[in-house]
Image (cartoon, rainbow, N blue to C red):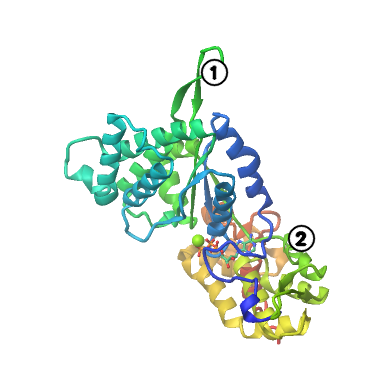
Amino acid sequence: MRTPLTNPFQPGSDVVPDVWAGRVEQLSDWRDVVRPRRRAGLYERGRTILGEPGTGKSSLVRRIARDAARSGDWVTPQLRMPSGADPLKLVASAVLRLADHAGLRATATQRVLQLLDRVEQVAVSGFSLSLRGADGTEPFTALYELLVELGRAAIDQDVVVVIHIDEVQNIADEAALSQLLIALGDALTHETEVSAPGGVLLKRFLPITVYLTGLPDFEDMAGSRKGATFARRFRTTTLTALDEGDLREALQPFVMNEWDTPDDQGGLETVRMEPEAADAVVALCCGEPFLFQLAGERAWNAGSAPAITERDVLAGWRGAEGEASAHVERILNRLPAREHEFVNAMADLPAPERTATTIASRMGMSSATQIGPTSQRLDTVRGIITRGKPYTFRNRAVEAYLTTDWPSTR
Ligand SMILES: Nc1ncnc2c1ncn2[C@@H]1O[C@H](COP(=O)(O)OP(=O)(O)OP(=O)(O)O)[C@@H](O)[C@H]1O
Ligand SMILES: [Mg+2]
């Protein structure tokens, strides 16, 4: 039955939505590269997934983590870094829980028991342990050593350890961030000996992987400061808008009459979406995952008939226009002044005239080189524009907002 209770669209954060679109590359990277390679003892970097608010970073890694947990892997929950929090504390307690889950304590040697105690102290006092000059190993070393033990237990069980740290841009303390990255990076690059058939000792990497997710600002924090070491240990991907094909495919079960939902008699009922309605959702959301869920949710709730019509989509969207504007404003208002100005100048020009030189002169500069760093960041770090000939908007919602009446449909 089509009621708000059975609505499968989920505009909100940190959920794995029932109506999933795209991200095929990132999902297959986990399934076909990261997991099999780490499991086989081969080196593979951790992954950093960055993107503007609402691009689906948390959902993506939650989905990867969910799939991993289903195949028996040892997975931390999504560890969200609150602003100003001590990252070592949070990660240490999560790793301790995994160690318990792995039964590490039951078989532990004296050394490992001491290590567990030490990491428990880290979970309580965190980074500050090292500042107090307390005796014992440094907090990040203890965390690293426990990860090694956990990794060795994972080899025995033939599973992979997955650590997901979210909102990494909130780790404001440079020293704490550096310690966290060292502990994780050292675990990723640690080689351990295992005995192969015939008694030969082989070296292998641990079946551990780390996903860091957050806003593109993290790139500046970790990228430039940690430089090459960070790049050797983590591979960064920037998430951008979903393409129309992926969105259409996500709505296909509705269009094809295959979306079952409970009715009030304890049976199932199918909710359909007319093809024009699906087209309208795809067009209105401009590829933004959050807006896709929002448009879908509103359209579903705009009526109770078993078919969602284009009228439902438009009526639902009218009630969501404010939220849609707020979503784009959140992206724009976070931009440093120069980048914001650049995007505005670019939007003011007719599409074919959006070249570096023309945009620069709009901004009152004499040459395109002066805006080089700004446009580069908007392209590679944020994924908001593409520096082709001419420049184009990759964030279609930003483009629609600045150059048309969108989100208004009147
Ligand atoms: N692949 C996807 N297909 C469909 N909807 C998605 C997809 N990924 C995310 N969403 C939806 O987009 C919204 C935002 O997702 P999410 O919270 O993961 O974004 P985020 O990038 O982590 O945002 P923030 O920067 O605010 O933390 C959610 O409503 C989620 O359901
Ligand atoms: Mg998030």
Observer-nearest residue: 166 or 124? 124
Occupied quadrant, residue 276: bottom right
Residue 376 visible in the current orientation: no
Report x, y in % for residue 271.
76, 75
Q: Position of residue 113 (x, y in %)?
A: 29, 35
Q: Mark 1 or mark 2: which comes first in sequence? A: 1
Instruction: Identify the residue position indicated by label 1 in the image.
Output: 196
Q: Nearer the viewer, residue 269 or 400?
A: 269
Q: Taking 48 as reference, is 149 left or right?
A: left
Q: In the figure, 277 relative to 63: above or below?
A: below
Asked whether the viewer can see residue 92, the reply is yes
Q: Quadrant of residue 169?
A: bottom left
Q: Residues within 10 Å of mark 2 (few under 14, many from 20)?
A: few
Distance between the Cα atoms at labels 1 and 2? 47 Å
The residue type indicated by label 1 comes to: Ala
Amino acid type indicated by mark 2:
Gly
* 218 relative position to 357: left or right: left
Q: Which residue is mark 2?
A: 245
Measured as percent of width and height from the top left, residue 203 is found at 49, 21
Residue at left 54%, top 18%?
196
Helix, strand or loop for disc 2: helix
Q: Residue furthest front?
A: 265
Kindly identify which numbered label has been placed on residue 121.
none
| Count of numbered circles on the image | 2
Q: Position of residue 392 (x, y in %)?
A: 68, 61
